[in-house]
Image: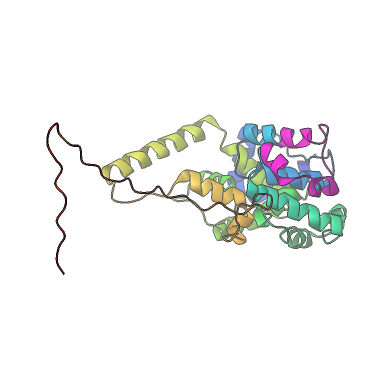
Amino acid sequence: MHKPAIDHLRERDPKLARIIDRIGACELAPRAGGSHFDALVRAIVYQQLSGKAAATIHGRVEGLYGDRAPTPQEILATDDERLRAAGLSWQKISYIKDLSTKVASGELAVESLDSMPDDEVTASLVRVKGIGRWSAQMFLMFRLGRPNVLPDLDLGVQRGIQHAYSLPKLPTPKDVLRIGERWAPYASVASWYMWRLLELPDVIRKEAKARSAARTTRAASPGKAAPSVKKATQAQKRGSNATRTHSSAKKKSSGSAARPSRTAAPKKSTVRRSSGAKAKRPTKRRR
């Protein structure tokens, strides 16, 4: 299936050729089940979550509609509280509702995305709240099966390139694009190999050793704050969240206003009288 891509990558990139030899045949294949709308809803649900947790929530959401993928109209007719009870965050509910609104109104011709060039697909999808360039790239690669997608914002691709080319530090998105120029027009297959590279035992051990060294460094110099790997991963998975940050997004309940916080009234001080003793009254000061 991917023989032309493999032959091209072997010829253009000797280091990638050695990685291909170690990993074997490419198993990259687009997900054909359901509609494009279903795939985008799934992509939003899976943002910033582990596969198991995301699959559980996605299953609960479909359970609201008879264990099937809902239509845009059905999602718009569903109360936010029910979606929240299924495990979706308020932010993701707003994303899915925005997607449903744009698809139902025809603003996003989701079933026509197949006929668009990659850049037009990306431009159409990033208009949806919560979907940015990274999410659009994942849709192009895993839904539409486009062959030349290079997810420069993806942390896994960046880490794979760092190991493949023995770079001293994590490559920037610009570095990824520069290195990936030689992979065109089969960057999707090359990216798949970068992800699989991270699953090799020696790479896993090397990353574990690097994390241990980083912890030792932080312990030795507590005054210097080291960047959090978890935060870096979340920022990478957000995709649009790296290019279209929704800093003003607020969690919304179903039309209810936020309750003001209550402050406890100060307790009155009491003076315990001893047996037979009278409490002295405080003397008034003259002004």
Residue 69 x, y percent position in the rendering: 82, 39
Q: Which residues are magenta?
A: 58-86
Q: Nearer the viewer, residue 104 or 33?
A: 104
**Magenta includes 151?**
no
- The foreground one among 173 and 236 is 236
| 14 or 242: nearer the viewer | 242
In the image: residue 234, left or right of residue 215: right
- Give the image's coloring scheme: rainbow
> Is residue 178 something one can see in this rendering?
no
Q: Nearer the viewer, residue 165 or 7?
A: 165
Rendered-image quadrant of the C terminus: bottom left
- Residue 64 colored magenta? yes
Q: Is residue 36 visible?
A: yes
Q: Position of residue 82 (x, y in %)?
A: 72, 40
Identified at 25% across, 42% down, the residue is 270
Q: Quadrant of the N terminus?
A: top right
